[in-house]
Image: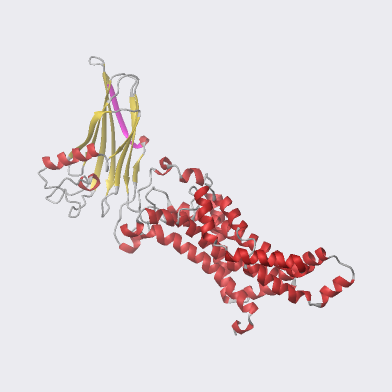
Amino acid sequence: MSMPGGLRDLLKAISSSKSGIIGVAILLIITGVSVFAIIFVPFDVVSKWNNPIFWLENPRVAAPEWVTFITGKNIPSTIRIPPEKFNKYEYYVEASGLKYITLDARFDFNYDDFPSELTVILYANYSKSRPLVTIKLVRPDTLEATLYKNVIDNPVVYFYISTDNAIKENVYNFLLILGTNTNRTIYPEKCLFAINNENMGNSNLAQILKGSYRIKIELIATDESDTANAEFISYGQVQGLAGTDYKRHDLFIGLVWGAPVALAFGLSAAIATSIIQSFLGALSAWYGGIVDEIVQRVTEIYMILPFLPFLILISLIYEINLWVLIVIIIALSLFGGVTKTARSVTFQIMSEQYIEAAISYGASKLRILFLYIMPRLLPYIVANIVLAVPAYVFLEAALSVLGLGDPLVPTWGKIISDAYSSGAVIHGWWWWILLPALLIMITAMAFALIGYALDKYANPKLRER
């Protein structure tokens, strides 16, 4: 079957309009991003996105790496020393029955600012007694700070140097030994990397000490078979193309995966509601009588019902996911303004000669509705779909900001919602809000440009010369 003439004219209007070409180009880029997400980010993003261990190696609320080109500063990136990069020295003293294990690693820190956090992960394999662990940081000026000295409780221990109160106390004592004036608010990631002067303990005035650092971990175990490995992470202030959020998520992955979700959500809802409403409008006009009366009265009831409060009520009562949300939106949009418009357009189509010809050779009403009337409504349906998609993309974002979206799927709206609840605006984490908001606006603009081209197709006064 050939393409209906109205649809051919509609596609020609898009391809011959500058706004239509730009809108299609933007839409193709977004579609390409969606394909990229599906092909090149193959892991189960839903389960991984909500697994904090998976993102442990990322810094918290780090800006995008391209910020360094704007600021002109050498902003620190994350330095990770895996277990295989540690030099291991171990020996057993039979007379005392003790085994000594030393894990040692060097790293260069030549950035213009301090790291955001420090973490040591210890993997200890012991059979009897728990080993005594000592963690030290050796600075480029040969000063050695003891960060931790105690018996560990578990085979795998995470030492959050920046937030652990016991480690903060040890850093405070280290500063006291050096005779540095300080207050009780200690930021180990700054004090340990600061030049040794009177401002070393002042997080606002401290100056970065560049050079080669060493992380040294010493264990005293009680069995010859005991051993250990370690991992060290110096978190940076920049990460990836889109930065990270407060839960260490790589926002680039969330933004990339948000593209197919946004398009699927917007297109699914727009296509379903536009086709259903257009069909009901055509059905109402074509059959008339009691059918027309019922459809019009139900449409009027739907149009005055408060749409958003119903969604809020359902979301509060039931725990819904993204696709259930689409079904609910479609169910609440079975009738609407498109039904009224499609009804009026159908009355115009009914007066045309080919409809009278179909009636004269005995075509059934159902056949005429599906084969003669609905194809003529297709250009209007397509135009309405294009104009409706941005509204549904904005709706998903609005519901997420209200806390009514899918809590598990990383959508653009969910990212903005998390940024809002974490105070991103107050703390100046602009990338967390700006990037997803920009993608929502670009997507809406693409469909708006295509809709503008279709508007000019429908209204000759707007056509470009």
At 76% from the left and 75% from the top, the residue drawn is 349
Residue 8 visible at all? no
Residue 28 in the image, given as x and y percentages of width and height: 57, 63
Magenta stretch: includes residue 87: yes
Closer to the camera in the image, 116 or 388: 388
User: Percent position (x, y) of residue 8?
Assistant: 71, 72
Magenta run includes residue 406: no
Q: Is residue 430 above or below residue 101?
A: below
The relative height of residue 225 versus residue 157 in the rendered view (above or below) is above
- Residue at 17 percent across and 51 percent down: it is 202
On screen, residue 384 versus residue 206, left or right, reads: right
Nearest the camera: 81 or 316?
A: 316
Q: Is residue 335 visible?
A: yes
**Going by the picture, which residue comes out furthest to the left?**
179
**Residue nearer the viewer, 34 or 444:** 444
Q: Which residue appears at 23% of the width and 50% of the height? A: 210
Q: Which residues are magenta?
A: 85-91
Query: Residue 51: which quarter of the image?
Result: top left
Position of residue 278 measured from the top left corner of the image (x, y, whole percent): 68, 66
- Residue 216: percent from left, percent from top: 26, 35
Q: Quadrant of the C terminus?
A: bottom right
> What's the colour scheme?
secondary structure
> For the stretch drawn in magenta, what is the main secondary structure?
strand
Q: Quadrant of the N terminus?
A: bottom right
